[in-house]
Amino acid sequence: GQNIDQPTEMTATEGAIVQINCTYQTSGFNGLFWYQQHAGEAPTFLSYNVLDGLEEKGRFSSFLSRSKGYSYLLLKELQMKDSASYLCAVNQAGTALIFGKGTTLSVSS
Amino acid sequence: SAVISQKPSRDICQRGTSLTIQCQVDSQVTMMFWYRQQPGQSLTLIATANQGSEATYESGFVIDKFPISRPNLTFSTLTVSNMSPEDSSIYLCSAYTETAYYGYTFGSGTRLTVV
């Protein structure tokens, strides 16, 4: 079976740093994706990890530990526009992405 | 990465009717998928659209309710049949190509309301 867990909601203030965790249990693994989704819009790709370690891309970073079935998305210097849902998704080789339930992040001033 | 044109972007339909959603990709892709996103929820995989053969459905989804076609490597349709208000959701198609860095792209979604 497959199970992907992430917190339902998080809140933070502008300029702060927030870490969104994702744990997964899947029968196969070929990479972990993070997507951002604003209300009423399609998901937008943020990051992809297939090897252990940290991938940094501007204000956003993503970490993966395959042995622990664990990933996190780190958002720095938060802005109001970062208020959105953040979706963790796992890829099993050659198949569709399987998504977690998503984390709704609210950034306040 | 591939660009997907999905239509319609939204529709309001009467219960008992059917709606067909189309996705056109600007290049040949290896795989195409259909997802449903119910209000306030994440994406749930409906099926993998297989080129030239029957789609592969996930648990809880059946062909009679969600027939899917994929006549070639750039086009797919999803029909939501005999609709009820519970079918009100956003439906998204996705494409995967091995040549792209991260492989997966999404259409802009179809917001369906059944009344």
Image (spheres, helix red, strand yellow):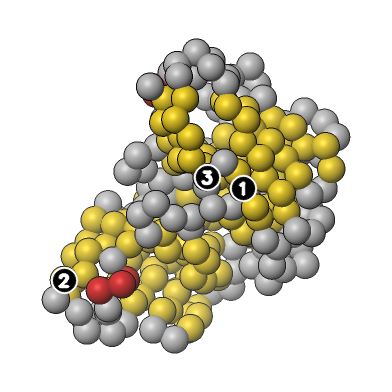
In which chain is the residue bearing label 2? A
Q: Secondary structure at mark 3?
A: loop
Q: Nearer the viewer, mark 2 or mark 3?
A: 3
Q: Nearer the viewer, residue A2 or B10?
A: B10
Q: Secondary structure at mark 2?
A: strand
Q: Are marks 1 and 3 in contact (CB under 8 Å)?
A: yes
Q: Position of residue B10 (x, y in %)?
A: 48, 40
**In the rendered image, the vertical position of residue A71 relative to residue B54, given as above or below:** below
**In the rendered image, the vertical position of residue B80 relative to residue A25, given as above or below:** above
Q: Are marks 2 and 3 in contact (CB under 8 Å)?
A: no
Q: Is residue B4 left or right of residue B35?
A: right
Identity of the amino acid at label 2?
A: Ser
Quadrant where the C terminus of chain A lies? bottom left
Q: Secondary structure at mark 1?
A: strand
In which chain is the residue bearing label 3? B
Identity of the amino acid at label 3?
A: Ser
Q: Nearer the viewer, residue A51 or A96?
A: A96
Q: Is residue A102 left or right of residue B108?
A: left
Within 10 angstroms of label 3, few (less than 14), some, or many (20 or more) residues? some
Residue at which label 1 appears:
B6
Q: Residue at x 52, y 66 (%)?
A: A45
Residue at which label 3 appears:
B9
Residue at which label 2 appears:
A108
Q: Nearer the viewer, mark 1 or mark 2?
A: 1
